[in-house]
Amino acid sequence: MALETDRQTLELENLIGARDAQVLVRAEALVPGAGRDAIEPLLADASLYISQADLQSDRVVLEGTVSCQAAYRQGEESTLKALTAQTTLNHVLEIPGAQPGMLCRVRGQAVHVDAKYENGHMIFQITCNLSAQALRLTPEQVITNITGAEGLQTTYRDITSVKLAAEATELALVKDAVALPAALDARTSLMDWAAIEIESTEPDLGGVKVKGRLLVETLVSSGVAGRPAVVIRYPMAWEQLVELPEWLTGDVFSECDLRAIRSQVEPAGEDGDMRLSCEAELRVKVLANVTDRASALTDVYATQGASLDVDHETLRLCAQASQLRVSDVVRGTVLLGEGAPAVGTVIAVKATPSIGEWRNENGQGRIDGVIEAQVLYIPGGSDVPASTEAELPFSVTVPQALNDRSVADIQVLSAEANALMGDRLEMKLNLSIACQTRRREAVRVVEEVEEGDDIPRRPGIVIRWPDADETAWDIGKRYAVPVDSVGEIEAGKPVVVKA
């Protein structure tokens, strides 16, 4: 009777390559009416939006937009002014082995911005972190059953293969407005920054519905004496249906990017209150995992008749994919720079986190980094705004182990600063941490089995002292006897095999 095998096809997700890079981008804008007065930037912000990722042979070409904004003071004026600038980002990341048609995961973030005034222009220098991964889905067949030989001894292993099967994207437009009390005497909107909080990702009719909040902070100029500006904080709820076939909605996770945000102070209505209206564009992405499972033959031999020639292969697959979102609070003290005026009243805090490294401790991930904080304030005994910058180290723990290709994203949901003394500030920052980890492993399975020569028989008893890593399976296979007849392996004790 000839050997017969049953086979099952699995689709394996392989990481072909990954590349990280840090690039410096420059943007500039004309400062209107600058004249001979000194221009002092007080608060700056930058954001990066990757609009296109083109996977080519051995590389990925990224295109995006960097948007900048700054609040500044002109001369000794107490009023604040603001401007915006925009530039494009084009960068190539080399990924050997990448080919068109593969899956490509791309991330980008502006982690630092430096604004300075030169010859009538505001010059922005923006540091951006970029990362890309190229993934390939490869079909592989594994043997799930074998028959047709006498005295077969087999071992099987349950294999789980998780693959990123699809991704879908939708653009969402979010609008809202909040009332501004007349006592605030709001004039114009100066700057906006926001954090995105995803609250749920659930299958819905026609696809997947993603819900969340956009936590917006807007710096508004004020006509109140001694208070040239104030920060208005307000959440904007949003939800977006992303179309996806129903069979792909069982294991999904989502991401969201801020494409643009604009706000405007509107004139007072009949109730006498002014309004702050805000409009934001979001890109909502849903990614779908699909899991294949099989019980694969990992080794086989015969105890009677013909011997078996066995060829093995090593499958490299993604065995598990996990996502989580947690929150944490970071506190610290910030010292003002030498010569900086003493703090009277804090107006605004702009904080940007930058991840340095992560490691695992007791089965949990620990992420270390630095938060770059900009504080806009009114000095004591003055009405001319000033600012200071500081770096605050942080360390947060997430309840899952990470690896070198995990994806981590940290956002500052809110930042507060209070003057402890004139030369130092106490900071409190609420963080949102999102992590994605795909655990990859190599699995050795049987690729082909063929009948060989007849098993040579020499009746007798063999006494063998097992090697340190030798198992009952190894001894049974060596002497072509059933595994059950070998018995248990104990260190330092001989095994008696009846051949």
Image: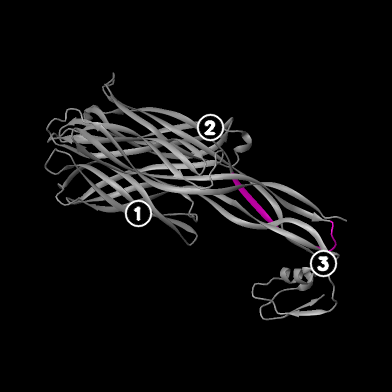
Neighbor class of circle 1 (other Cα within 10 Å; few <14, some 14-19, many 20+) is some
Neighbor class of circle 2 (other Cα within 10 Å; few <14, some 14-19, many 20+) is many
Q: What's the colour scheme? A: one colour
Magenta span: chief secondary structure: strand
Residue 242 image label? 2
Q: Residue at left 11%, top 42%?
A: 381
Residue 68: give x, y in percent of width and height.
31, 35
Q: Is residue 48 left or right of residue 342?
A: right
Which SS class for mark 2?
strand
Could you tell which of marks 3 and 1 lies nearer the N-terminus? Answer: 3
Residue 302 in view of the camera: yes
Which SS class for mark 3?
loop
Position of the C terminus, as image quadrant, is bottom right
Residue 84 image label? none
Say what amino acid the circle numbered 1 marks: Phe
Work out which residue is located at the far right of the displayed protein and give it: 1
Say what amino acid the circle numbered 3 marks: Thr
Work out which residue is located at the far front of the displayed protein and give it: 57
Tag 3 near tag 1, CB within 8 Å: no
Residue 241: give x, y in percent of width and height.
52, 31
Rendered position, 139 above or below 231: below
Residue 219: give x, y in percent of width and height.
27, 34
Magenta stretch holds residue 156? yes
Residue 213 in view of the camera: no
> What is the spatial separation of the Cα atoms under label 1 and label 2, in whole angstroms?
35 Å
Which SS class for mark 1?
strand
Position of the N terminus, as image quadrant, is bottom right
Residue topped by disc 1: 394
Residue topped by disc 3: 303
Q: Residue at left 50%, top 39%?
A: 55
Q: Which residues are magenta?
A: 148-163
Residue 113: give x, y in percent of width and height.
29, 42
